Each structure stands twice: as C-alpha cells, then as structure tokens.
Image (cartoon, coloured by chain):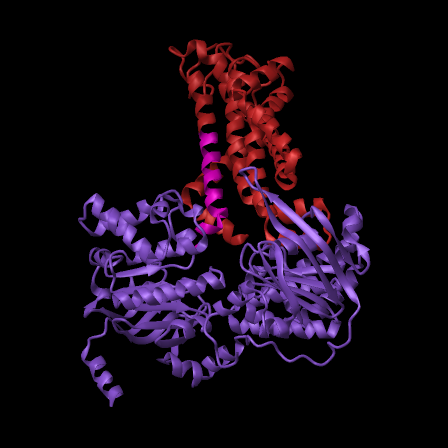
Amino acid sequence: MSSTAERFFSNRTAATATIVIGLIVLVALVGPFLYPNDPSAVVAKPFELPFGAYPLGTDVLGRDVAAGLIYGARTSLTVALVASLAALLAGTLIGATAGYYGGLLGDMLMRCTEFFQTIPTFLFAVVIVAVLTPSMTSIAVGVAAVSWPPVARLVRAEFLSMRQREFVHAAECLGAPDHQILFQHILPNCLAPIIVMGSLTVAQAILLESALSFLGLSDGSTFSWGYMIGAGRTFLRSEWWLCAIPGMAILVTVLCINIIGEALNDALNPLLKD
Amino acid sequence: MLSTLSLRIDRMEEPLLDVQNLAITLPSDADRRHAVSDLNFTLRRGETLCVIGESGSGKSLTGRAILQLLPKPHVRLSQGRILFEGTDLVQLGEAGMRKIRGNSISMIFQEPMTALNPVLSIGRQIDEVLIAHTSLSRTERGRRMREILAETNLVDPDRILRSYPHQLSGGQRQRAMIAMALILEPKLIIADEPTTALDVTTQAQILRLMKQIQERHRAGLLFITHDFGVVAEIADRVIVMERGRAVESGPAKEVLHAPSHPYTKSLMAAVPSLTPRIRDGQTALEPTTLLAVDSLSKAYLLPGGRSIKAVDNVSLRLGVGETLGIVGESGSGKSSLARLLLRLSEPDEGSIRLDDVDLLALNRSQLRDKRHLFQVVFQDPYGSLNPRWNVGRIIGEGLRLRKEPERKVQEKSEAIIELVGLDRRALSRFPHEFSGGQRQRIAIARALIMDPKLLIADEAVSALDVSIQAQILKLLDNIKRRLNLSMIFITHDLRVAANICDTVMVMQSGRVVEAGPVEIIFRAPQQEYTQNLFAAVPGRLETD
C-alpha cells in the first residue's frame, strides 16, 4: 500500500492538486469560524471592487463576496461528498448484486440502471430537486440519483470477471456465505477502479450542484458557489468578477479532483507498476 | 569414415547463427543480476536446436535477444555477439533489424490467441507481412498465402483467410501463425513453446508439421521448450539451461540417454513415467464406496440458441483411499464435471452421493455445512489465492467459517502449513511473496485443514515446472496415504495420471470413453480415442 502512495506522490501534478484540495477543504472546515463576516449580511455598498476594504469586493446587495466563497465551499463540498458517497454505495450494491448473481435478478437490475442512464442527467436532477422543493438535502438526492448508474455498471463488470476467479470458487468450496464472498473476497480486489470512479463522481457532483444553484434551484438561505454565479450573472458585462471568482473556485476544485482521480488510476493500476 | 566426412562438411559450412558470450542483464531489483550469462551456441541450416529449461532459466529471453526484442530498458543485452550469417545483430541497429525480422528470422509464440490481432482477419494479417517485405501484386500475394496455408495442412485455405482468430481452433490458429512465420521463407525460425497451449494430439501434429516444413526449406529451427518429450520428438541438438547458464549441451540422443550434468539428470528424473507405478498390493480388497455418481448430465446454452452437452451421462464410483484420474483433451468436459462434483454448478440430471449423503437434495445452507467434506485444489497457483489476504487468513478461512475457536484455528494452521512443507512464518505473509509451487502448497493446505474425505485436484500441477510438479505429486501422494484420502485428479497430462492414479477415466466431448484400473488402461487401451491419445504423447523416454 505504501508503494501505491509513493507512486501517487511521485506524480508532481497529483501532489500539487492534493495540496490545493487540502487547502480548500481546510478553508471550508475552519473558514467560517475565523472569517468575521456573515455571507448574507449587508456590509457595504454594492459592487465594491476586489482588493479594497473587502478582499474580494461586495455583490449586488452589498454582501461580502469572500465570506460567500468560504461558506459556499462548505455547501458545495458537503453536497458533493454526500451525494457521491450515496451514489457509490448504491452503485456498488446494485452492481455487485447484478454481477455476482447474474441471471434474471442481474438482468432486471441492469435494465433498471440503463433506464436511469437514458434520462438526460441534468434534466432529471432538475426535476427531482423541483419536486422535492429545493434544499441542500434535495440537491444531494438529485445529484446522487443521476450519479449512481455508471458506478453500478463499472462494479458489475468487475464483479462479473472476479466471480470466475479461482480464489472465489475456492471460497465457495470452503462453504463461505455469499456476503463473505462479496465483501471480503471480491470487493477488496475491485477497490482500485471504484476509488477512481468515486473521485471523478465528486468532481461531477460539484458541477451539478453549481449548475442547479445557478438555475435558482437551491436553498435561498445557504450560500453556494453556483448560487453566487447565478446571482451575479445579470451584471456579467459590468461587474464580471462576481461570476468569475466563484467560477474560478469551481474550476480549480473540479480540476484538482480530476487530476487526483487520474493519478489514483495510475497509482493503483498494477500494470503500470515499475 | 562416413561420420568424419560429414563432420568435415559441417566444419566447412558457416553456421547460420553463432551466439558468443551472450549476457542479458536484469533490472537491479531482480533476484539475480543476469538473466543469461556466458551463453555460447551455434545453429546450422536445416538443424533443430532445442533450448530446454524451467521457468526463469532465461530460455525465452535468449530467443527474444536474437530478434532484439528484449523489454528495454529494464532488461538489456550487456555483452556478447549474435552473428547471423556473419552479421552481428547486436550492432545492426533498429532499421536493419526491421529488415531481418519476419524476413530472414521469424518467431512463433506460445499462445496464438494473444499473438494474433483479434480484430483483423487471418488473411489481412498474413498479407501485411507480404506488403511490408515484398513487392508482389495483390493476386500473387493471394496465391502465395493459399499455398502456404495448404502447406501447413489447413483445409479450405480460403475460409481460413477470411476467418478471425476467435473463429479458429487452437491448432488452426497455431498453424496460421506458422504459415505467417514461414511465408517469407526465413532462414531461421525461433519457436517459443509453440505447442505448450495445445492438446497432445494437436501438439503431435504441429511438431510433425514444423519438422517437415523445416526440412523442406532447410531452415534453422531454434525451439524453446520445457518439455523433454518434445525435445525427444524434434531436436537434433539440445542446450539445457539453468538460471541463465547452459549447464549441458550436445546431440539430443546423448543428452536424453546419458545426461552428464546433475541438473539435467534431476530434471529428467522429475518427468513422470508413462508406465504406471507398481502399487502396494492393497488393491485386491474392494474399498468401501465414498463417492457414487450416477448418469450425471449438464448442457450449456450456446449464444446461437443451440446447446452443448458438456457432461453427458457420466457415472463413476470412488472408494475410500482411492485416486481416480480423469483425463481428456480440452473441451472433453473434465473441468465441467469437476464443477458439478464441487457443486459449483447445477447438473441437469443425475445424482451425486458422497458418504451416503445425496448432495443434490441439500438446500444451500445444508450444502454449506457439508462442503468441508469435499475440497478442491485448482490449476492456477496465481489465481486461486486472494491476493489481498495473508496466508494465515486464507488457510484459516474455512475453520473460521465453521466457528472454530481462534486458538484451534491457529494451532491447526501451523500444523497444516508444516505438513505441506512450508515454514509457519509463511502464515503472516501474502501470496505474491511465494513461488508457484509454494502457492500450490498453500492451496493444498487450505483444502486439507478442513479434514476432507475427498480432494478434487483440477489440473493442480499443470502450471508448474517438472521438478516442482514432481514435489507436489509426491506431497499429494504422501498426504493421501497418511490421511486415507480419496482423490479425483483431473489432468490432460497422461504422465501425471500414470504417476498418481489407481483408476483412470478417459473423457471425450462430455462422455466417458473408457474407464478402469490404471495398469490396464495404460497398457492396453481398448478404444481408438484412448489409443490415439497415448500415441500422441511426445517422445518416449528411457523411463517409459
């Protein structure tokens, strides 16, 4: 396992991306306690320029943009993480069951997965959030609901091939019950692609959450990066930084997570070991 | 007089291939510095030189070094000259080598399925060789391809040319590979274990074919193999390699009949004899029946909607302490039968009674409680152990599943790991730290710790080197005697079957062709299929 870490961090870009993500997570965790201003409080006149009295200026209502960014990081990251974990869990369970048991059960689960996959992702998320009334929970549910099908298909393929491996047959011959074979024997051997998929799902979830907030499908009382871009878009031509600043935050975060995912893929791939 | 004359002619003719002081360096973290060192040999036109050795002896790297196909930069040629018709291939450079590869020297690999491109038709792939090295017109190329395929005894060359690799059988694929290697009439053919993946009967045909073609074209053949039988069949001269060094070389007859180096002797002694061993006279007593299988059948549905009978009406009896060998070629249904006996797949009809329990009448949880009675050792020592578990956990799994106390699991694991000839410290290590033979011992330990009454070994020694194979066979035989274990030994290797079995069952396309005591079946096979199978075993050795 240590050699996996070594291979991961020997990739300079991946190491940098990890540091950047670490900083963003740190800001999201402790920022609200250290930064004095409330993001929804009106603190000055609207459209203050950045690097003045307020580090990133103020928005249309005179709210502190920097405070919004810090509190927004919390929302965006929490929603993305919760939604991705839910999607991974659901996708893994469904994929594992379909791959291991196969047959009619497997076919039914996969047809169901394909059904979800054929609905346009974003529209589906919009519908779910709109029906459940916009809130952080409903956004997480919406994002998770559109993110699990690719995970399920990946996990199914992995389990399908692992199922034929001799050590799995050997465990069956020892009288191991199904849950032991599924979660003790097969799952640990499929973890590498699942972890990589998970990291990419997080990046996808941040984008989805931002897009939903941008459309106004968000909890009005919680700040998120997408909400800030949505609020600033009417002034894009005169006060462009209101969109550009949270936009940059999204860009950097998603880019870093993608880089980490790619690097994990390389580091965990035994074929590239040497 | 005649021999001195021919000797003189040999001396006059310049060797086709002259390898001098060859050394191949391994990366610094390998278990030894040189894969090959101090290797010298020559090969003349029309001659077959066999390089024999166990895995890791450097025989395959030698073949690749000649074509300058070493996996650089980790493995590189550090010393020596490879003179091909007087030109040093080491100094030739990549552009010069490209002209020689395929054209003057060609290579045949072990597994034609991976050596051929799966998405191009055979015709396209052979055509590519011709386009790259000749300026023949399209019609001439087509004629040449049909000629060469006919020469490799492939019926209906036109169909073969249109086919994709997966549409052909293993033997047809290897013939197509040979055709591709020969189409430019190379002066030297390097064959790296070309028959290892094939059934004995197909192997015999391919060996005969290669010999014929080589004689017809007077090409030099460098044949890399691990099988002394194949050497006896095809070689003019032999080089025996051990850990990168040639320990013995000479004319095939001399090396095979009077090996001088202790390593060669030990290798040859490890090859199981085709003559069944004489068993201690307990066979007269009829042992009590442990396993009774009656008219077992299993059909699989093919994609086209047809079905194939993988196991067709098979019945067998196995007594306590007896060993039954199931032999047959690939596709004969022997592994499908094993899966049925292991209750890994559901039979369509028939019955399996083990120790007077009807295994097919049990529900899932009842079956789990009975599974310890019949255990298995699989073929692939790399695939049969969970790579993420340490050996202690692997071996103890069965007992822990039966809710045995941890103390007892520990004690028994330590006892069993020593029984199979490993150190108890092995328990805390992971499978990848062990060699193939050691892993197979771990797999045997995992099976034996359950105190089974029946052990099913599915090609359990097929992936091992002969010397390791001999050790594992001896281990199994010892254990069988000590524990009065019954065994079903599934193998495609008749020598292995002769070595360990009391009774033998010969299978062909799902059916039992012939069954009986090993001495009788091996001495006087009644059925034509069995006779052909025996005739195809390569190279009769001294011990047979």
Q: Is residue B403 left or right of residue B437?
A: right
Horizontal relation, residue A108 to residue B321: left or right:
left
- Furthest toward the right, the residue is B356
Range of residues picked out in magenta = A252-274
Q: In the drawing, does residue B61 fall left or right of residue A19?
A: left
Measured as percent of width and height from the top left, residue A120 is found at 52, 20
**Looking at the picture, does residue B117 appear above or below residue A113?**
below
Instruction: Return the x and y of residue A124 as percentages of the image width and height.
Output: 56, 18
Nearest to the observer: residue B398 or residue B175: B175
Look at 75% across and 58% down and name the residue there.
B372
Count the numbered circles shown: 0
Give above or below for B519 relative to A128: below
Q: Position of residue A213 (x, y in %)?
A: 54, 17
Q: Position of residue A148 (x, y in %)?
A: 58, 30
Q: Main secondary structure of the magenta part?
A: helix
The quadrant where residue B517 appears: bottom right
* Quarter containing the N terminus of chain B: bottom left
Colour applied to chain B: purple
Residue at position x 23%, y 80% from top?
Answer: B10
Left or right: B89 as drawn, with respect to A66: left
Instruction: Confirm whether residue A78 shows in the render.
Output: no
Judge whether B219 appears above or below B250 on screen: above
Residue at the image point whose x is 52% and y is 26% from the top: A206
Q: Is residue A272 magenta?
A: yes
The chain coloured red in the image? A
Nearest to the observer: residue A17 or residue B515: B515
Q: Is residue B86 visible?
A: yes
Q: Which picture quadrant has residue B393?
A: bottom right
